[in-house]
Image (cartoon, coloured by chain):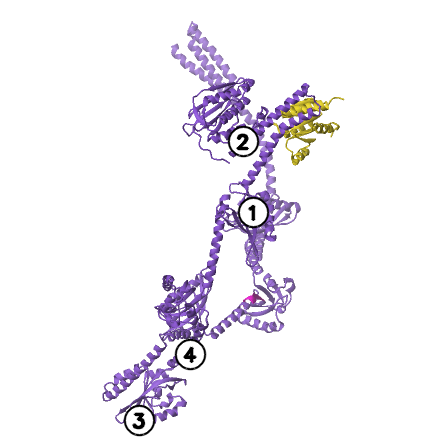
Amino acid sequence: MNPRKILVIDDEDGVRDIIQITLEVVAGWEVLTATGGEEGLAIAQTQQPDAILLDVMMPRMDGLTTFKQLQAHPQTQKIPTIFLTAKAHISEQQQFAELGAAGVITKPFEANALISQIQHFLNWTGF
Amino acid sequence: MYENQIPILWLALMAVTALTASRAGLKAGLLTASFISVYILHQTYSAVPHFEDFTTSYLSIIGISFVALLLGLKSNQNRRIIQTQKVDKIELEKRVKVYHKFLSYINADLSYNLRERIQVEAALQSSTARYQALATQLESITTHAPIYIYELDQEGRILSVNQTYEGVASYEVIGTFLKDWFPLEQQAKISSVIETVFTQKQAQILEYTLPTPQVEKRFYQTQIAPFSIENYPDRAILIATDITEKKQFEAVLHRQALIVETIYDGIIVTSLSGEIIDWNPGAERMFGYSKAEVLGKTPAILHQPEEINDLTPKILEEITQQGRWLGEIHFIRKDGTQGICETIVVPMFDSDHQLIATVGINHDITQRKQTEAALYRSEEQWQLLLKGTNDGIWDHDFKHPQYFLSKRGYQLLGYDYKDIQSFQDWLALVHPEDRDRMNQAFQAHLNHQTPFYIAEYRVRCREGCYKWVLSRGQAVWDETGKPIRAVGSIADISDRKQAEEELQQYQNQLEQLVEARTAELTETNQKLQQEIEARSILAEALLASEARLSGILDHAHDAIISVDENQHIILFNQGAERIFGYGAEDVLHQPLDILLPQAAVEIHHQHICRFGQNSQTACKMRGRRSVLGRRQDGTEFPAEASISLLQFGNQTVYTAILQDISDRVAAQQEREQAERALRDSQRRYATITQVAPVGIFHTDADGNCSYVNERWCEIAGMTAEQANGQGWVNAIYPNDRPAVFQAWVEAIQNHTLFQLEYRFQRPDGKITWVMGQAVAERDETGNIQGFVGSITNIHARKQAEAIIREAERRWRSLLENVRLSVVGLNGQGQVEYVNPFFLELTGYTRPELLGRNWFETFVRATDRLQFNQHFQQILQQDLHNYYQNIILTKQGEEKIIAWNNTRLQSTDGKIIGTMSIGEDITERYAIERMKNEFISVVSHELRTPLTAIHGAIDLLSTGLVDPATDRGKQVLKIAAESTDRLVRLVNDILELERLESGKINLIKQWVDAIDLLWQAKNQMQVMANRAGIRLEIIEQELEFEADSHRLLQVLINLVSNAIKFSPRGSTIMMSVALNPENICSHPNDSWIVFWVKDQGRGIPADKIDSIFERFHQVDASDSRQKGGTGLGLAICHSIVEQHGGKIWVESQVNEGSCFYFSIPPTLKEQENES
């Protein structure tokens, strides 16, 4: 089985690095990173990761816009996307779910929680 | 010799030749010529040796030959001709013989034929004559118009005519084509008819018109028939008759028939035997029967049998005698309804003037009869009306000058018909003072200002006095609104008027009248007394003054009657005539009794006797009581009489002077009645005033009180005596007296009611509010006789009013001044009241809002339905006492208001609206919102580094990553960096809070500007180096007072930002200046301005204002990325503001930014800023 490719899009270096290390070391997955929405879109289209972790608060292109763009492109439509947000309002989480996000994770998060949630989606064979 | 002989010879020879040639012909001639020629030659030769001299010989030879030739030919020709002619002649003679024979045969033939022809011609002529006579006879038989008979051949050519039109000869016609005599348009027809005649061998009839030279078109009827006689089989004969007259006659008949058909009246033609032989459509319409139904029947079907049977012989009789019968007949229609018609029956004669039929023309007058009957009834009513009403009826038709007045109208005033004929006559009789008023009333009605015309005015009677009449009427207008007629009635209201006047008079001048009368009577009495005495003194001078006396007698108004000893009337003056109605002649020498009522006669005799015994010369009969007199017509009347006695020598004459006091008596009776009525009313009045709950007072014209009732005294606290005269004034509160007098005067001047609220003050000082009302009593000339009025105690009301006013004032003051919105709505949600604070809040003016719908003006469209429901619930169920909503100001700004609502009820429990008090909580909300936003942002900012730290620690603590490994070191580093960031963030937030809440006090130090700049540069040098950016300072010697540590913080922040946003290789410049006008514009002198200029990517113009806010969203992430907290500029702003300075930026995108901050030279005492 090929190791899973996960794309992490977050403008914060620290957070991104930690996630990357966590996923690589703990789950053994291949982690692709992007510092912004456009970069993330490009990588997603070319590399076709198995899941995307998307930060909500980003400059220039924020998480929501990036997500819509991902949905718009046929290549990236089907990739399960998980939002990362610092805002813990339940109403907002519902909002993301309604949009079609696979899940929402609030920061700070448990490493295991993160991994298990991603795992859950990776085991899906499709929508 | 030879020479002379030659010519003669030659001539002779020529002659011979000629002769021979002409006689014997050519051959002979030539022969002769040749012989001669030889001869000549010979002769010549012999005479002349040379040939050259043969010239003359030759010439002569030629000449002779020529002659011979010529004549010979001619002769030959002649001979031939003669020969030919001879032959011809013989031939001709032969032929002549033959012809001669032939001609004689023919001649015989011809003479035979000629004889025959003469016979035939004679026959023809006679037959033509017969034929002509026949034609003429035919003409006279048929019409008196000419008949044209033409004979035509197959092609339509005219072969013979019997006569032609005037001016056209027969020979001009014969041989021409018939059709050519017709106008072009008819020619084709003529030709075709003629052709038809010949082809079909049938006669054809044709009608046509032709214009003739003399007269207009004439009509012709033509018959063309085929016609053949022995030798001429194909002929046609044309007979044309002039039918113009016939046509005209026909036209007339047609017109006449049309008249009969279309006329509206019914025309019935009846035969002598009584059957209907003709019936026009008018009769159909009138009677209902159609022509077919009535022909052959008698007219009896149209009438009552009895009636018609009676009538028919009469009709016939009259027709025979008078030529026609005219009358009205009742008839019955087919449907059974009845009617009346006006009928004329005339006879119809034939040409022998024999009666053959009667023609009846019936005109339906049923409608007219009905109208007449109605009119008659109406006329009857009118006459009855005129008779029955006691009023005069007038009719003024504006179109005619005549003015109709009914008999009673004339009677009322004692005039004749001829006295008043036009409206002007009437107007002249109207009293001058009343004319205008009457006219105005009349005009007002004509102009539609009043529904009917009514006026009272005086009219002069025949006798000269004026009578009051009441005239009422109605005008009639035409379609344009112009009055065309007015009709009305006049009634004699003189009695009423008189009574009115007299009543008025008596009320005011009761005693005076009585006194005046008494005085008058006394005076009259005295005068009479004197007169009588004078008369007795003047007894001797009676004769001398008899003329005067008779004059007096004649002109005296009173009756003067003298009787002798025997009570026979010897003197009866005109006054007596007038009063008693007798003429003087009638009564002279009659006993006095005739003037007395029956009942009084006996008593009178007694009195006379008694009187006679008494030698007093004058006394009143029966004293002051009235006597009764009897007029001629038997009516009795009261009179006042005085008698005197005169002695004429031995004669005794009693003279009575009598006055008809019937009027006076009547007046007196009326007066007594009026007095009684007055006393009654006075009594009633007194009762009323006594019991009335209001004070009543009377004053005279000058304001002197003459009467006050009990109640008044109660209210005023004074007695009636005290109030009398001017005492009542004391009852009025002194301060109100001027107002009362002024109102009093005004009321008098303006003829209005005096009405005023003022105060009474009782003697004990107590104040009572009263309402005073008074009206002036005026006489007929409008002068004030006095005043009557009432005083009502309104004190309680006034007090209540004052309380209410005070309460209202307090409430109003509260509403106007409170710093809350107060809004009152009515049941429909319309604004009834808004207080000034609300107006201030929303930016409207009061007039703009009153009456406007609350929901449409203030509530957002999306909320309207919901709030309307709330409103209804408040009204009906008293819910929602407290709620908040958003309202829109005039500018469209949204404000959040917290309302307290109550519903309003009217005194009878009906819900009339709501009253709400609202607090503007917009600010509070805004602040709440801002706080929430800040917390949300801050929490996000805090969480971000925490995530990294948490994640890192998690990895390390669970052993997933070994800290000794590179991985581990990386994780640690991330954790450390994030921690730093977190610490810095928290510090900055706290710092900012402290700065803004004023907890930090700035330390006043003396600061060297250059020193400060260098410190900043040094601190940032490492960072700048790492970023590859050069830092430069432009030195300026300056010293000032400030908190150097804090200012350093500002400089470091600014430089740090500049480094973060500048590209590698660029330069950042720092400097300071004192009041630098060339660098920036600053209003204050001696301020120190620092600036940091970079060559970075600049700030967009729309973001410049917001970068000094906390966590400005512009590129907060960017600065964070580069290690910032997003609070740096906010802190700088706070520090600079604390110094009392300003911080600003000038920037150009992609070129660079320059941050400035200014500091005042001396620090002022800082007040705590919240």
Give how far across and how far down residue B551 sits, in percent: 28, 82
* Contact, mark 4 vs mark 3 (Cβ under 8 Å): no
- Return the residue at label 1: B899
Earlier residue among tags 3 and 2: 3
Q: Quadrant of residue B89?
A: top right
- The picture's colour for chain B is purple
Tell me if I can see residue B855 in this picture: no
CA gap, disc 4 and disc 1: 77 Å
Earlier residue among tags 4 and 2: 4
Q: Which chain is yellow?
A: A
- Return the residue at label 3: B614
Label at residue B980: none
- Return the residue at label 4: B676
CA gap, disc 4 and disc 2: 110 Å
Q: Both on one chain, marks 4 and 2? A: yes
Earlier residue among tags 3 and 1: 3
Q: The N terminus of chain B is located in which quarter?
A: top left
- Front residue of B171/B556: it is B556
Q: Residues within 10 Å of mark 4 (few under 14, many from 20)?
A: few
Judged from the image, the secondary structure of the residue bearing numbered disc 3 is loop
Q: Both on one chain, marks 4 and 1? A: yes
Give how far across and how far down residue B42 sits, in percent: 46, 8
Q: Which residues are magenta?
A: B358-368
Q: Both on one chain, marks 3 and 1? A: yes
- Residue type at mark 3: give it: Asn
Give how far across and how far down residue B508 sits, in percent: 37, 74
